[in-house]
Amino acid sequence: MKILVFVFLCMNISLNVWAAPKPACAEFQRVLNTQWQELTHSYKKVDSRFKKLESGNSPFMISKSSTDLVILLHGYLGSPFEMNRIAASLKTKGYSVLNDLIPGYGFSARVANQYTEDYWDRYFDTRYKAAFQCYKRVHMIGFSTGGLIIHKFLKTNPKHKAASVHLISPFFAPTLKFVSMLTEWFSLIKTEVSLNLLYYSTFGAKELKIMLMYPNYYLQDAPYLNMNEIVKSGNEVVQMKSLEKNLSPVVLYATKKDLVMDFDVTTKMVARDFVNPRLVNYSETQAPHHLFRHEVSEVALKFEKTLLSAF
C-alpha cells in the first residue's frame, strides 16, 4: 500500500482524469504504476540509503488534455528538474505532460551504475508504446541522453509517428574533449567520482555550473559505468543499418561548440533517420555545451522560448 501511495504521489497523476479512462489509457496508467513500483523496489535494493525520490528528482504526470501528451526526458546526471520550467509552461498551454526520469537517476551513482542501455530500451519501449495507444498526439522532447533514448525508440519503431520531436543536443558520439574527460574518470580507481574533483580539470565553471548550483537535482558523483552504457547505446544507433525513416517532424537544436556531443555525427544521424529534420544551429552564439537551463546562459533562455513557441 505504501508503495502504491508513493507511486501516485511521485507521478502526480490526477485521479479525476483517470477515473474512467478508455482501455488504452488504463493500460498506460498501469504501465506507469507498475514500472515505478519496480524501480522503487530496485533503488532500495541497490542502495539501502534510498527511501524515496525527493521533489525535483521525481517524475510526474500532469493530466490536462485527453488528446495531447508531451513527454519530457532529461540528460546525463540530471533529473526531471531540468525540464520543470518547460513542463510548467506546457501545462498552461493545456497539454498533458509526462516529465520523466531515466531509470537509475535521481538518487546516487551507486544506483545509476546498476542500469544498462538494454534495460532502458525495454523500459521506454513499453512506456512509449503505451503512451501512443492512449493519446491521439504524442510530442517528445529529449535532452542529451534523453534525446538519444527518444531517437533510438523512434528509429527502431518507424511506424510510431510523433506529433513533434525536439532533440536538444542528443548524445550519439562523444567529442575528443569528452573522450579526454572519460579517460581521466577511468584513471581514478573508483566507481563514484566526485564532480568537484573534475571541476576545473575538465569543463571548468561554465560547463558544470548548473550541476553545482543545484546539487540536489544532479548526481554529484559521476557514475562512469553508466556512462559506458550511454556510449554503447549511442554506438548502437550509429551502427544501425539505414532502415525505414521515421516520419515524425523533428527539430534538432545543436551547436558546434558542444564539448560533449559530436556535432557532425549528431546531424548525420538525425538526417539519416528522419524525413526532412530541421536544424536550429547555435554555433555562432556563446551557447554552453548543452543548450538548456537558463541559469547557464542567456542563450539557453532564448532557446527555451524558441522551443515553447512550437507549442
Image (cartoon, rainbow, N blue to C red):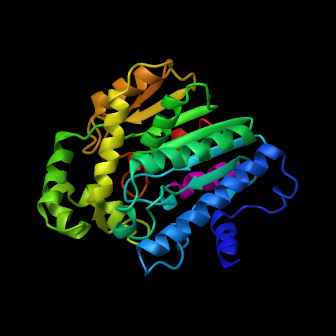
Q: Position of residue 14 (x, y in %)?
A: 77, 61
Q: Position of residue 308 (x, y in %)?
A: 58, 42
For the residue pair 279 and 134, the one nearer the viewer reads as 134
Residue at the spot x=17%, y=52% of the render? 181
Tell me if residue 282 can be seen: no
- Vertical position of residue 71 compared to residue 60: above or below: above
Q: Position of residue 36 (x, y in %)?
A: 60, 62
Q: Is residue 116 left or right of residue 23?
A: left
Q: Is residue 210 left or right of residue 155?
A: left
Tell me if residue 134 can be seen: yes
Residue 89 in the magenta stretch? The answer is yes
For the residue pair 123 and 106, the one nearer the viewer reads as 123
For the residue pair 303 and 230, the one nearer the viewer reads as 230
Residue at the spot x=55%, y=30% of the render? 157
Dividing the picture into quarters, in which one does residue 212 lie? bottom left
Which secondary structure is most common in the magenta stretch? helix
Can you name the residue that lies furthest to the right here? 20
Total numbered labels: 0
- Vertical position of residue 171 compared to residue 155: above or below: below
- Vertical position of residue 105 compared to residue 3: above or below: above
Residue 309 in the magenta stretch? The answer is no
Q: Quadrant of the N terminus?
A: bottom right
Residue at the spot x=44%, y=67% of the render? 217
Q: Position of residue 3 (x, y in %)?
A: 64, 74
Magenta extent: 83-92
Q: Quadrant of the C terminus?
A: top right
